[in-house]
Image (cartoon, grey):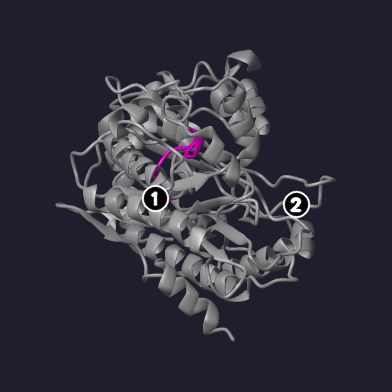
């Protein structure tokens, strides 16, 4: 946990921003994989972590703003439960470390709401687990079908306002997560050799994340089929001449995430064509980084990176015509179907459960529903203290190519005869994590091999 004052200050700021009502923050419980007592690794709700730091299952936090009351509902394990799980830190000690003085047993939670203790508006966030929806339905006496629609928009906006700007303590946690993530990528680049399966390498990467004190921040993407954006590791054996796309991240014990991507050859060297495509992505990546600063819309950075990708694809003969017109019409989305990046923090896609319209956009800047742009999670102006990812890519998806070619979609920009030659190429993505500073941005964590020559050198240092 951070210091007690960090959590007290966060809750004070929430009360100031929200002004009135009662906030209910449900924690997560244990969840069975294939039977009740065979649990998935426990992961606490990120907003509860943010305001309390308490990282144990089955706790609920209530903040009554008008009456200035804070209550933590939860139980210590019984002696019989300790037989299975071992001793734990008493709930009272955790509450004290968080600055919470009022603790009640979990059995009193239902009565607290049933007897009408909160006489003002009850604020809760949109649930992302079905069991939380059921709990809210029971506690608040509303039809379960209405639970999502009646969540508090004012609470969502207040939470986003706080969590989107990272405190110094959080930046240190994020830097630790990124450095462990870099260790994972170094291992992948040095050990992604012919004959190994994707799952063998991915398993080793997860071990590095766990050894770092936490776990992975999302299921590892490690694949020789990088043309599919979120293709997870399979039993496929790597083959000389292929490219491997590895997108992975570590999460610290306090829940802060790293998220990086590298693409590397299974062989000792990139082929000439692989090098050309890689350098197009690297150029877009570096161009986007140079543009990062407070006040610039990330949407505009995305479009800038897209224009650099188009310029590179024109050099390969895959796209023709005016670059800006090609981007405005969406020709680049045949090769770059997703967004340039996203917020990162206690969630790898930070606060995504609160809704992209609130996290990545504003009341005046609405998210597009156009292919490509609708996958851009962050569009609004950057602020000092934001932590974001930058991850342009080129993906040669044969199914998408066939579909577009069949209708000659945007053929005024796309040379389909040349694109056909790339249907077996795969994909390239490069991703790093950045803190927005007062004037520009700063790379989080220690630098990791990124240029063609540096990646090849790292491969060959493992020999």
Q: Is residue 137 magenta?
A: no
| Of the pair 90 and 348, the residue shown nearer to us | 348
For this view, does 123 lie left or right of residue 216? Answer: left
Residue drawn 72% across the image and 45% down it:
31
Q: Quadrant of residue 63?
A: top left
Residue drawn 76% across the image and 59% down it:
236
Q: What residue is pinned by disc 1?
A: 389
Residue drawn 46% across the image and 47% down it:
393
Marks 2 and 1, how far apart at CA = 31 Å
Q: Position of residue 386 (x, y in %)?
A: 29, 47
First to last magenta residue range: 334-345
Q: Position of residue 214 (x, y in %)?
A: 56, 64
- The tag on residue 39 is 2
Q: Is residue 152 above or below residue 30?
A: above
Q: Visible in this render: residue 337?
A: yes
Helix, strand or loop for disc 1: strand
| Of the pair 91 and 344, the residue shown nearer to us | 344
- SS assignment for the magenta stretch, majority: loop
Which residue in the rendered view is the most extreme toward the front?
Answer: 417
């Amino acid at each position: 946990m951070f210091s007690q004052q960090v959590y007290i200050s966060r809750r004070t700021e929430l009360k100031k921003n929200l002004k009135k009502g009662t906030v209910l923050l449900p924690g997560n419980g244990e969840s069975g994989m294939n039977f009740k007592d065979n649990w998935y690794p426990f992961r606490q709700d990120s907003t509860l972590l943010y305001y309390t730091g308490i990282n144990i299952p089955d706790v609920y936090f209530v903040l009554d703003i008008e009456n200035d009351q804070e209550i933590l509902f939860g139980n210590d394990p019984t002696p019989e439960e300790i037989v299975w799980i071992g001793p734990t830190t008493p709930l009272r000690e955790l509450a004290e470390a968080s600055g919470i003085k009022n603790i009640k047993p979990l059995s009193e939670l239902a009565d607290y709401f049933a007897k009408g203790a909160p006489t003002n508006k009850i604020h809760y966030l949109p649930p992302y687990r079905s069991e939380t929806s059921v709990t809210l339905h029971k506690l608040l006496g509303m039809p379960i079908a209405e639970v999502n629609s009646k969540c508090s928009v004012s609470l969502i906006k207040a939470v986003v306002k706080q969590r989107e700007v990272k405190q110094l303590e959080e930046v240190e946690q994020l830097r630790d997560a990124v450095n462990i993530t870099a260790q994972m990528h170094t291992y992948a680049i040095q050990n992604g050799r012919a004959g190994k399966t994707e799952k063998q390498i991915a398993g080793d990467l997860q071990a590095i994340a766990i050894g770092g004190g936490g776990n992975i921040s999302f299921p590892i993407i490690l694949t020789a089929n990088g043309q599919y954006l979120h293709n997870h590791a399979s039993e496929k054996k790597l083959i000389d001449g292929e490219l491997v796309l590895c997108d992975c991240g570590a999460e610290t014990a306090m829940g802060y995430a790293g998220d990086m991507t590298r693409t590397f050859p299974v062989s000792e060297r990139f082929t000439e064509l692989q090098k050309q495509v890689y350098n197009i992505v690297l150029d877009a990546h570096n161009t986007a980084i140079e543009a990062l600063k407070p006040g610039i819309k990330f949407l505009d950075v995305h479009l800038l990176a897209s224009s650099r990708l188009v310029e590179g694809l024109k050099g390969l003969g895959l796209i023709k015509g005016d670059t800006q017109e090609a981007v405005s019409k969406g020709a680049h989305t045949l090769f770059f179907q997703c967004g340039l990046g996203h917020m990162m923090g206690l969630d790898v896609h930070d606060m995504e459960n609160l809704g992209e319209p609130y996290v990545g956009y504003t009341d005046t800047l609405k998210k597009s529903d156009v292919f490509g742009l609708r996958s851009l999670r962050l569009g609004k102006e950057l602020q000092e203290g934001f932590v974001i990812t930058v991850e342009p890519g080129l993906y040669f998806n044969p199914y998408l190519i066939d579909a577009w070619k069949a209708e000659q979609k945007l053929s005024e920009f796309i040379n389909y005869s040349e694109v056909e030659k790339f249907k077996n190429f795969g994909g390239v993505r490069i991703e790093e994590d950045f803190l927005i500073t007062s004037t520009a941005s700063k790379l989080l964590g220690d630098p990791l091999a990124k240029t063609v020559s540096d990646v090849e050198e790292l491969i060959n240092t493992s020999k």
